[in-house]
Amino acid sequence: MKKYLFLFLSAVCFFLSACYNPKPKDMLDQVKTKGELVIALEGAWEPWNYHNEQNQLVGFDVDVAKELCRRIGVKARFIELEWERLLNCLEKHECDIVMNGVAITPERKERFYFSTPYAYERAVVIIRKDNDEIKSFGDLNGRTSANSLGSTYDALARKHGAIPIIVDTFDETINLLLQNRVESTVNSVLAFNTYMKNNSSAPLKAVAVSEEFSRVAIPCRKTSENLTLLMEMNNALEAMRFDGTLKDISMKYFGQDVSK
């Protein structure tokens, strides 16, 4: 009799324990419970994400993020950081995702899960117009190149033997070039095209464009609790691609469709 009583009480204890210690919610549940998705970006990289004349945060990443959140059923909350802090911020649970034109690389895939790509872009070598010595990526060897630490552009410049000069923002990079304090930079061809559109008299030129396209996607932490959020984001992105929303946002900021 005591044996059965013990088994009964054990079962009751297990049931009560399960009730008071529910299974931890996955990231999608957590995001929906708090009603917002915390998104980290630079806020200083036109036209990807930047502040307009009214100091409003706008840009391709911003519009895509807001529409993504609308389809998931939550609000977008943005936090702005220097590029080199973005991915560390994600690992430290200070944000839920990063949307900053982040390219998928083998090294990053070891650290994070990535959504399906929402944009494709190429890298470009930018120099002063009076520089006739740099004509290709190979010519970066032994030349100074200003880039954000940890970016794919920084890695590409170093791969070709450039002497790295670390900067925080695209504007800082351009200013160093204009002041003739660095010889080159490697950056987004889309960002450079936008800059020249707004500053047509700037004494700068592009001399080489990468052959391969970078796949721009959304990184999130590489844990099982993020899989449902990842699936939800992928579903939303594919729906945005199918109904033309990604194309419309792309045309708004880039003047071309970079979503495929």
Image (cartoon, rainbow, N blue to C red):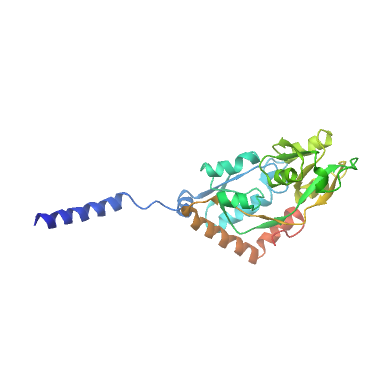
Location of residue 121 by image quarter: bottom right
Q: Is residue 51 above or below residue 70?
A: above
Q: Is residue 116 above or below residue 151?
A: below
- In this image, 69 relative to 29: left or right? right
Location of residue 166 by image quarter: top right
Camera sees residue 175: yes
User: At which x and y percent is residue 208?
Assistant: 82, 50
Q: Residue at x 55, y 50 (%)?
A: 220
Q: Is residue 220 above or below residue 246?
A: above
Q: Which residue is more in the foreground, 43 or 146?
A: 146
User: At which x and y percent is residue 52?
Assistant: 71, 43
Q: Residue at x 76, y 58 (%)?
A: 256
- In this image, 85 relative to 175: left or right? left
User: At which x and y percent is residue 103?
Assistant: 66, 52
> Which quadrant: the C terminus?
bottom right
Q: Residue at x 73, y 53 (%)?
A: 253
Q: Residue at x 53, y 60 (%)?
A: 231
User: At which x and y percent is residue 72?
Assistant: 53, 57
Q: Residue furthest left?
A: 1
> Which quadrant: the N terminus?
bottom left
Camera sees residue 198: no
- In this image, 6 relative to 249: left or right? left
Location of residue 148 by image quarter: top right
